[in-house]
Amino acid sequence: MNRYDQAATLRAKMEKRQRVLPMVYSQKAKTLAVISGKGGVGKSNITLNMALALQDKGKKVLLIDLDIGMGNIDILMGNLSSSTIIDVLTDRKPLMQLLSVGPKGLRYISGGTGLDVIFQLDQRKWAFFANELSHALSQFDYVLFDMGAGLSKDQLPFILSAEDILIITTPEPTAIMDAYSAVKHLVLTENKLSMRVAVNRCRDQKEGLDAFTRLSRTIHMFLDVQVQFAGSVSDDPIVSKAVVEQVPFFIKSPQAKASRSVRLLADALFEREETRHKVEKQTFIEKLSSFLMRRA
Ligand SMILES: Nc1ncnc2c1ncn2[C@@H]1O[C@H](COP(=O)(O)OP(=O)(O)OP(=O)(O)O)[C@@H](O)[C@H]1O
Ligand SMILES: [Mg+2]
């Protein structure tokens, strides 16, 4: 195939994908991708417990575990789910029917393995997946994505399509450095992102704010980008106890320091939603489609 044939094939592929974007459902959900540079800094615990805190405020929340191959949200809840998002991608099963139900009725789905099939979907499968995800985005107030550590290529389109990105770090210099590298990677791919930072495992508020200041100054100095402070989460022994018992700490001990911290994180998200004007021009699905097309 010569260069002109290749360009024509690519154009046809893109036009087809644009045509099959679902038009039926309008997006209600706010989307948030929770990421980190370094592993083990508390993404899954924060995402799960923040989802429960949002539910406590009467919001409908869907949690999607996109830590492909390493997902553990169901283990943190003491549940085992057999269906994954890959079933929607490959077997064309309806997403809303595959959702598992966790404690307090929390809806969630695991990532499974092999998300990179999303780059090779034929038109029918892509249309089906986009339609299913779009349906879910019309049914929930929040869709939270728990991502794996670092930024793998199959997760990147989902992260970049989210309305907000929450970067989790701890106060340790190694975690801060890795958070900086993750932000750099994101910014080099897309420069209009809404990014916030939560500092986990803090002794007190000041430790969190100091760590955030170090990170945000470095990001501003070298990348010329602003990130917002989402809050600090206390270092609290209840977290590992809850992990061992497979009960989310927000349920096990709602007044523990860590639970109060995630409630404040959820509050920040909630208040922002109330005050924010509708500025999003593209839906999650539209963005996902265009990021996937860039890689076509
Ligand atoms: N606020 C906290 N206080 C005390 N311990 C914590 C806190 N947050 C996390 N931990 C500890 O860190 C461990 C890892 O947390 P978690 O699984 O949420 O991290 P992660 O970022 O999702 O990891 P991965 O990168 O592997 O997905 C927990 O099992 C717990 O022992
Ligand atoms: Mg995790």
Image (cartoon, rainbow, N blue to C red):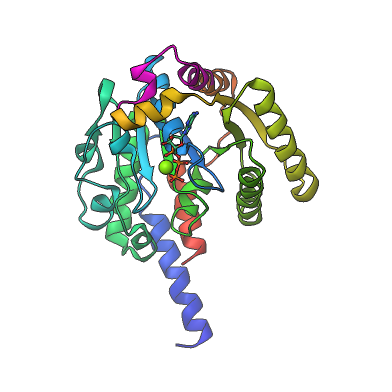
Quick one: 37 or 194, which is closer to the camera? 37
- Point out residue 272 in the picture as x, y percentages from the top left corner: 57, 22
Instruction: Let me know if residue 86 is in the magenta part.
Output: no
- Residue 166 appears left or right of 225: left
- What x and y, as percent, mark residue 3? 53, 84
Q: Is residue 165 above or below residue 115?
A: above
Give the quarter the ligand 2 occupies: top left
- Magenta portion: prevailing SS class: helix
Side (left or right) of 123 relative to 223: left
Return the x and y of residue 288 as percentages of the image width and height: 46, 50
Q: Is residue 6 left or right of residue 87?
A: right
Q: Quadrant of residue 123?
A: bottom left
- In which quadrant is the N terminus drawn? bottom left
The answer to whether residue 24 is visible is: no
Q: Looking at the picture, how far across and down is residue 286, in whole percent?
A: 46, 47
* The magenta segment: 247-264
